[in-house]
């Protein structure tokens, strides 16, 4: 569901149209489009052994559980390629984000000239984070590979990785997962299946649509 402020300023409109224009670009292997989002999964374990399903009876799980902390998930999604990668980390600090970006550049898209990166404007989602995690030369090399486009405040619905994170939550995370190792195993199997199917997002909303359907958000001239 879209979360749109009742009134928006020119900055919101500018960033919205910038992202929408990026989505209209034709595929370019030298400049792949990648959307990034992150979420949190609470880890919980059973306090009593679940009862397995039997003929005519469903399985049973006790309503009580034990909290085992949380884990962070970075979702990298290349919609034009039908590819995604989910990284599970203990935290969501600048260093974790920086290492996620290095994997994106060096492991997943090593032949790309530039990565067109769409993400929300969290304080950790900034090239400065690279300088906190790596030596200056390495941080500069990675930052030079990125063409960053931020979604506006209250505009996270513009990030296609948020849609992919929602699919992940429904298909994989809507269960009790006790620890980070199990979570990593589950999301790895999920992303392998989605990548094999080349599942993607059929994005239809354009800048022209925004100027009609979201006309109220545009400043009066």
Image (cartoon, helix red, strand yellow):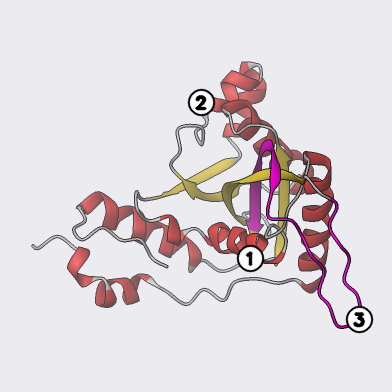
- For this orientation, the residue located farthest to the top is 135
Residue annotated with mark 2: 128
Q: Does 205 sit left or right of 60 as displayed?
A: left
* Disc 1 secondary structure class: helix
* Disc 3 secondary structure class: loop
Residue at the spot 91% in from the left edge and 75% down from the top edge: 54
Q: Does 10 sit left or right of 163 as displayed?
A: left
Q: Which is more foreground, mark 1 or mark 3?
A: 3
Q: Which mark is residue 55?
A: 3
Q: Is 141 situated above or below 17?
A: above
**Residue range of the region highlighted in magenta in the rendering:** 49-77
Q: Does 83 sit left or right of 201 as displayed?
A: right
Dividing the picture into quarters, in which one does residue 72 lie?
top right
Residue at the spot 64% in from the left edge and 60% down from the top edge: 169
* Disc 2 secondary structure class: helix
Tell me where residue 34 appears, x and y as whole percent. 61, 54
Q: Which mark is residue 167?
A: 1
Check if residue 51 falls in the magenta segment: yes
Tell me the crowding category of disc 3: few under 14, some 14 to 19, or many 20 or more residues within 10 angstroms, Cα based. few
Residue placed most toward the observer, 184 or 182: 182
Residue at the spot 66% in from the left edge and 54% down from the top edge: 30
Q: Quadrant of the C terminus?
A: bottom left
Q: Quadrant of the N terminus?
A: bottom left
Check if residue 14 falls in the magenta segment: no
């Amino acid at each position: 569901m879209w979360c749109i402020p009742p009134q928006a300023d020119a900055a919101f409109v500018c960033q919205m149209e910038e992202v929408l224009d990026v989505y209209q670009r034709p595929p370019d292997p030298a400049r792949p489009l990648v959307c990034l989002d992150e979420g949190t999964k609470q880890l919980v374990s059973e306090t009593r052994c679940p009862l397995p399903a039997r003929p005519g009876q469903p399985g049973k799980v006790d309503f009580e559980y034990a909290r085992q902390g949380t884990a962070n998930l970075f979702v990298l999604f290349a919609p034009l390629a039908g590819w995604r990668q989910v990284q599970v980390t203990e935290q969501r600090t600048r260093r974790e984000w920086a290492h996620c970006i290095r994997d994106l550049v060096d492991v997943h898209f090593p032949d790309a000239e530039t990565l067109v990166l769409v993400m929300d404007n969290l304080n950790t989602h900034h090239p400065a984070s690279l300088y906190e995690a790596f030596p200056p030369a390495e941080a500069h090399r990675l930052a030079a590979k990125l063409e960053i486009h931020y979604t506006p405040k209250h505009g996270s619905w513009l990030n296609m990785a948020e849609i992919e994170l929602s699919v992940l939550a429904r298909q994989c995370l809507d269960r009790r997962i006790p620890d980070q190792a199990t979570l990593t195993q589950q999301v790895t199997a999920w992303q392998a299946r989605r990548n094999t199917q080349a599942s993607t997002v059929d994005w239809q909303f354009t800048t022209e649509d925004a100027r009609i359907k979201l006309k109220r958000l545009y400043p009066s001239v």
